[in-house]
Amino acid sequence: MYEDLLGYLLGALEPDEMQRVSQWLKDNPEGQRQLEVLRKQLEPLDEGFEAVEPPPPDLLDRTLDALPSGAPPDPELNDLSGNPLDALDPILETQSGSVTPASRMADAVASRGNDFRQKRWNLYDCVVGLVSVAVLLAVLLALLLPAIAAGRFEARRMQCADQLRELGSALTLFASSDPKSQFPAVADSGPEAFAGVYRLRLEDRGLIPADLSVYCPSTDSSQQFASYPKSSLPSSHGAVGAESVPAVPADLTAADLSVPFDTFDLPTVDQLRSLTVDQLKWVQRVSGGDFAYSLGVMNSSGYSAPKFEGRQHFAILADAPLTSTLPANGSAHLLLPHGDRGINVLYEDGRVEFVLHALLGTMDDHPFLNHEGRHEAGVTVDDASLSRSPRAPFVDAVQR
């Protein structure tokens, strides 16, 4: 995002990009702070800049007057009666003494340049020129591509972080209106026993904006579901509810699944029990999108949803891993979004932090494993354990 901010400050972006960055800055205090830092860093350049004085207008005439009369012999003009200056005779004859020194110089250079190009520009020069241009382009690409790639990575990461913040606000509103101040609950068994049910509960309360996506641009979600049984997928934009859902054509391919999955109408929580097994499995798989939600915690009275307490280091939502299962150590062979560099983690106090892959296994509270190293619900009230949408809070839970 630093490249976009610098371009915005210098006015070097396209109009649509300027508008996008301007809109992003309105709702992002951190971005405004970074823009102000860049502006202060550029101020010394403006203060230390000294304008270069233009050359005097009579510089060329004074230079020509100072040159000795005549010109040294030129091998290229030996075929002009032995005198190199004979090339200027037509100019002097047609203008009869009215030629200025500047025009004599310009015409002589133009005549000699044309003759030079006719005699010297050959295939070898063309090849050398093309190779030089190719090398220059390669150098420019080598310098620009890393910066462009870094800018794209940062833009996608920030978009995912913004989506997490919006979902975090919806989760906080849900907990604030709950009698027990709890986040959306994941059932310990049955059709509601999957992490992605949080989205259905938020939508039942009308807390998710219509334009909010639960799919991160760093993840190709269509490829994740391409291998899912086609007979269980609803048709595009078809409602998944108590009524039967039209069957998907048998020749459906992965390319047909490129429609964003958040454009499908999902059922309400009460309608989950009316779905067929295949429909239920599909809803459980796609409801949570690309984000991992809390599987719940164990307290003195048993299993329940986490209680909202504004804790700084209790993860409630994060970018989900791209792998369906997690290793026991929680970091080795774990494939993450954003080029496998790390994940955005939303904490209970509303803070979003980008955790690098290398640091994931060193965290006191691993976001995807409970304190016993299992990919299940937290074993204490302060044990955050997140998972992708289809995961149940316990390995042996029945989800139908």
Image: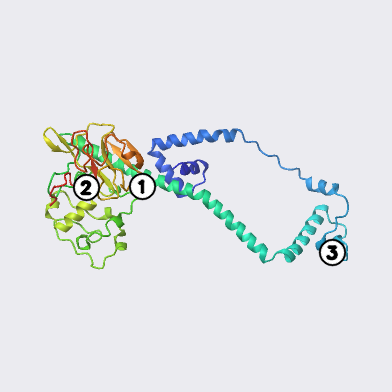
Viewer-side residue, 147 vs 215: 147
Q: Earlier in the sequence, mark 2 or mark 1?
A: 2
Q: Which residue is mark 2?
A: 196
Identify the residue at image location x=46%, y=37%. 35
Coordinates of residue 9 in the picture (x, y in percent) = 50, 40
* Quadrant for the N terminus in the image: top left
Viewer-side residue, 265 vs 41: 41
Q: CA distance from mark 2 to mark 3?
A: 88 Å
Q: CA distance from mark 1 to mark 3?
A: 70 Å
Q: CA distance from mark 2 to mark 1?
A: 22 Å
- Residue 10 appears anywhere in the view: yes
Left or right, 291 with reference to 35: left
| Residue type, label 2 | Gly
Q: Earlier in the sequence, mark 1 or mark 3?
A: 3
Callout 1: helix, strand or loop? helix
Coordinates of residue 307 in the picture (x, y in percent) = 19, 34
Instruction: Tell me, yes or no, whether the two marked residues, 1 and 3, touch with CB atoms within 8 Å.
Output: no
Q: Earlier in the sequence, mark 2 or mark 3?
A: 3
Q: Which residue is mark 3?
A: 78
